[in-house]
Amino acid sequence: MATQRQIAANRRNAQKSTGPTSLDGKSRSSANALKTGIHSDALLVPGESPEEFAQLVDDYYALHQPRTAAERYQVDRIARHDWLQNRLFRIESQLWAHHVAQADPQSPVAMGEAADRAGAQFMRLHRRVVHSEKSYEDANRHLKRLQAEPVPEPVPATPPAEAPEPRPQPEDPKPQTGKLASFRSFSRPTLRELGLENAENRDNFPL
């Protein structure tokens, strides 16, 4: 678990970082935190300064110079838990002031009375502080591991495949009408040709 001395040293190092000096560099630095939405108003409570929070984030970005989205996420975690711990310490101070004010002003053990009355509240607050400190150190470890690895080269985008040209469709062949076989017309033979010109012959040869 990180000690208060280690946490304070990390904050001092972040504040010592001068960051970029050119106008373009300062502009990029100021926009760094917006890439992951850490400047969202949902992270602040009434009474906290968005400008101070933005400055803290920029200090950490200038210190760690994240190169990838994964590294930016860890820097965001570091800045967020730094800010959260400061908030929790202010809450602890105000909690003491609230309960001491309710004690007997003539009592020599006013703080003891306050601790006795609000012991459960102080314990919950202490657990929040410890959890935030662990998360702060965890983000630092992950960031160091990521920055020790080479940045993967971006995969070139594959151009979209061109649609193949449509093949020409063969023309429908014209149906060939076959020539019908011609039939010779035969005329009926006459009686003369059959040798039946006589009535006698006609009776013996049925037609």
Image (spheres, rainbow, N blue to C red):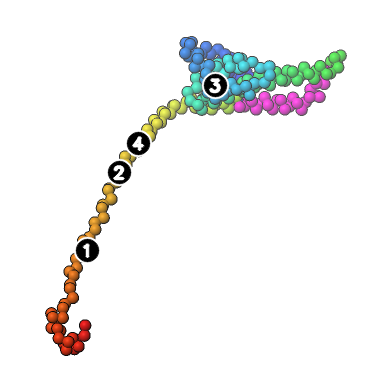
Task: Tell me the SS state at disc 3.
Answer: helix
Earlier in the chain: of badge 4 and badge 3, it is: 3
Question: Which residue is disc 3 drawn over?
Answer: 34
Q: Amino acid at mark 3?
A: Leu
* Dot placed on the residue nearer the N-terminal end, 1 or 4: 4
Q: Which residue is mark 1?
A: 180
C-alpha separation, residue under disc 1 versus residue under disc 4:
52 Å
The CA span between labels 2 and 4 is: 15 Å
User: Where residue 133 sits in the image (x, y, percent)?
Assistant: 63, 24
Residue located 64% across and 25% down the image: 132
Mark yes or no: residue 168 visible.
yes
Of tags 1 and 2, which is closer to the observer? Answer: 1
Name the chief secondary structure element in magenta.
Answer: helix
Q: Which label's residue is closer to the chain start, 1 or 2?
A: 2
Specify start and end residues of the magenta stretch as a single range.
109-135
Contact between marks 1 and 2 (CB within 8 A): the answer is: no
In reply to whether residue 111 is colored magenta, the answer given is: yes
Q: Which residue is under mark 4?
A: 162
Residue 12 forms part of the magenta stretch: no
Q: Earlier in the sequence, mark 2 or mark 4?
A: 4
Which quarter of the picture shows residue 3? top right
